[in-house]
Amino acid sequence: MLKIAVIVALMLLFSEPPPCAHATNGDTLFGVAAASRAMGGAGVAAPQDAISAIFANPAAVCMGPYCPGSEFVFAATVYSPTVKARVGVGPDVYAAKSDMKPFIIPAVGMITPVSEKVRFGIGMFGITGMGVDYRNQGIDLNPSSPGSEGDIYTQLQILKFAPNLAYLITPDFSVGASLHLLYGSLDLGQGAAHSYGFGAQLGALYRIGSVSLGGSYTTAEKITHGKVSDFGSGAQRRDLAMESPQTAVLGAAWRPTQRVLVATDIKWLNWKEAAGYKDFDWDDQWVYAVGVQYKDPDGLCLRGGYNYGKSPVKIHDNFDASGMTTIQGEPVPTLLYEYLRVIGFPAVAEHHFTLGVGYWFSDRFEAHLGGMYALSKKISERDASGTFGFSSEVQETSYDIGLIWHFI
């Protein structure tokens, strides 16, 4: 089983990522696999399967419903975001809808015992995706020059490969760690750049009767994309580093009965110190998640959740449209900079509502479905003279499936 899982993970890791548009908390998924996402992403203290344990808390590989045996998970999320933009140039207003199509984010994971107290896990999953496609839609900063900076296409994708070890210190206390290999692709309309990055994640999980407490920390993980754009200069294309932010999560879970689970997480994402995101002036983000699960003795499981994270994208009203700014030390026209921030990367969704259902067909196999709806959110700003105005509106819908096999 381990050999099969590794082969599948490597095939997905080194394949071309699917076309992406938007994720959830900023540009990062709030959960992986149907069970986790159906609970609003809450799960650092009580993951429900191998892939969500590796994603949320490496220590949880030693303490979960998948123990003491082995488990293999295949999951996928289908995202269908709706993104609209309006660009004002003097008295003229240009409006369009992004032409990005629905896309699929795959995930695979497995866990297996190494010894009585040590367990190994390995996972591969998409963690980041955002972008827009307004090509040939008539959104132009300069109406007399069709197809100028307004003919915009952006796409950022990150896949993560995570081998994991967890150690059971006592029957109710475990610690764990994952190494992260990231594969990223960035396209700003002048061709895609591909590169790799590295990082790590640490976690701990402690159980006190019916209550579990969990915590996780992920390092900042930088990927430098070579020669990705000239940023309107017409000169040689420049490199751009994009860094997944360092992230800290604390969570608690409570089982008032054997059938009911209530979980809640608080997450901090350090966008303002992350390369790329700090250049686009993103703020740090606090995310709050809560989920409830009811599991029937006959195998039926119902879930619901809510996830909120204030948009990290700052508003720059009254910006100087004739000025210059810098992106990673290189000069960029402020007008193009603001256009790219608001129209090109509008990762602004805040309120997410989730539902899910699962069923245990046997002791060996279970299946789960889920769905997410994020309320529409709009961001807009104008320059100091009132000549230029930019706005983006985002609404997200996603559907999840998870298939889980158990091995003794």
Image (cartoon, rainbow, N blue to C red):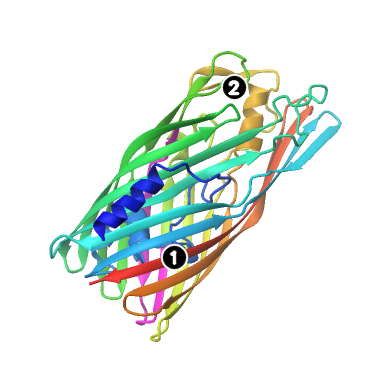
Q: What residue span does the magenta drawing correspond to?
A: 242-264
On screen, 294 above or below 25?
below
- Dot 2: few (<14), some (14–19), or many (≥20) neighbours within 10 Å? many
Q: Is residue 265 left or right of residue 376?
A: left
Residue lying at the far top in this picture: please name it. Answer: 235
Q: Quadrant of residue 109?
A: bottom left
Judging by the rendered image, the residue that carries numbered circle 2 is 231
Residue 108: % across, % down: 38, 56
On screen, 106 above or below 209?
above
Residue 406: % across, % down: 30, 70
Q: Give the CA separation, mark 2 to mark 1.
A: 41 Å
On screen, 395 above or below 294?
above
Judging by the rendered image, the residue that carries numbered circle 1 is 402
Quadrant holding the N terminus: bottom left
Of 121 and 345, the residue lying toward us: 121
Q: Quadrant of residue 94?
A: top right
Rendered residue at 74%/26% (across/down):
147
